[in-house]
Image (cartoon, grey):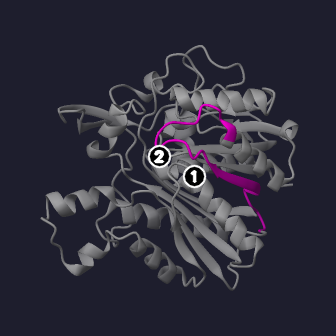
Amino acid sequence: MTIAGIGAVTGYGWGRETLWEGLLSGKPAARLFPGYGPERDRNGWVARVPEGGDPDLPESRYIRAIMGASREAVADATERGWRPGRTVGLLHAIVLGNVSEWRDFYTVDGGKRRSRDYLRLLPSTPVAMLMNEFGFHGPAMSATAACSSANVALITAQLWLAHGIADDVLVVATDLSAIPEMVQPFVALGAAVDDTDPLDACRPFQEGSRGFGFGEASVGFMVTRDADRPYAAMLGGGMSNDGYHVVSVDSSHEQIFDCVRRALASADVRPEEVAYLNTHGSGTAQCDAAETALLADLFDDRPQVVAIKPLAGHCQAASAGVELAAAALGYERGLLVSAPIVAPAHPRLVDGVRQGYDGITVKTALGMGGHNSAVVLGPIG
């Protein structure tokens, strides 16, 4: 399966080039917004998607972001020579959906809206809008597996293509949930940090990391069996669940290892052939421990380690989507992108932007509730 087109709406702004330029800058997408903290009495650092998008669409950041990322991915693929097959499917990777508007539905509108305004709250609405706009008639559904959702959607798309369920698949991963009511519980759990610049707080594989900063994104991929000028090849993928705890990672890391082994087997890739580990890299102690063990025990500390969340933020359901988009763009442009190192770090951690990027990548995602996933990417040619 190949990635034929990419679209992105992130905390950096609208468009994949805006994401790419933001990552190359080495500066976080997060800005200060009012109303955060336990008492909603201070500014908080979050990488929120800004207002924008198509003004002819409903006044919804959520719908405009999904439509913007999807339209850009389809247009990009078309410009690069892709033509839709008979059956084009759609997979939307989400967890909570249109969070801020559901909040307003209850707290501002008193649970009452006109039917057409209510309909835009439903996860099925943007899916139906996309299928209608592009004239796609293949299978259409949502995929949800916590912060593994984007990986899981791409793995599902690969299965659809392999079994002839679809000829092409538009995969979109969306999360716009960085509102105070959602951020504060994660801060209280000790997983998220919103009281300081992300590079001060989120330091995956570095000393002094306190957790992740919240981000928002919608990222689109047009994937197909073959394309004229694709960005990257998806060679395989694997999924598992710890079956251990609703929040904590199983300290044995057994299922995470099994997940990555399954991904490598499906891609027919040996551990020693992997050049890059594009990590979940949330900056939490549990995640760092799990991926450090994976790097040492399965990969013998050979691959270079990439961590992007200090820059783009942890975009929950869309987090792996942002990181896979960066990897795919990096293959085409010969640049390996990671966050800058700001403290004593793991010796394999990449410091900022490096020239040259042409080996096999394993992209891990570790979702709350033990949702593990791994995708294997490779360059074209």
Q: Which residues are magenta?
A: 227-254
SS category of the residue bearing label 1: helix
Disc number for residue 315 = 2
Q: Is residue 262 above or below residue 22?
A: below
What amino acid is found at the position of numbered circle 1 in the picture?
Answer: Gly
What amino acid is found at the position of numbered circle 2 in the picture?
Answer: Cys
Where is residue 354 shown, x and y percent of the image? 70, 31
SS category of the residue bearing label 2: loop
Where is residue 47 shown, x and y percent of the image? 40, 41
Residue 247 colored in magenta in the image: yes
Disc number for residue 321 = 1
Q: Main secondary structure of the magenta part?
A: loop
Mark earlier in primary sequence (2, 1): 2
Q: Residue furthest front?
A: 244
Q: Is residue 111 above or below residue 233?
A: below
Q: Name the residue at 69% across, 38% down.
A: 254
Please tell me how crowded label 1 is: few (under 14), some (14-19), or many (20+) other residues with Cα within 10 Å. Answer: many
Please tell me how crowded label 2 is: few (under 14), some (14-19), or many (20+) other residues with Cα within 10 Å. Answer: many
152 and 116: which one is in front? Answer: 152
**Horizontal arrangement in the rendering, residue 169 relative to residue 184 (left or right):** right
**Horizontal arrangement in the rendering, residue 371 relative to residue 256 (left or right):** left
Q: Name the residue at 52% across, 40% down.
A: 22
Figure quadrant of the N terminus: bottom right
User: From where the camera sits, is residue 153 visible?
Assistant: yes
When asked about the image quadrant of residue 124, the answer is: bottom left
Q: Name the residue at 62% across, 54% down.
A: 151
- Say whether marks 2 and 1 touch (CB < 8 Å): yes
User: From where the camera sits, is residue 339 visible?
Assistant: no
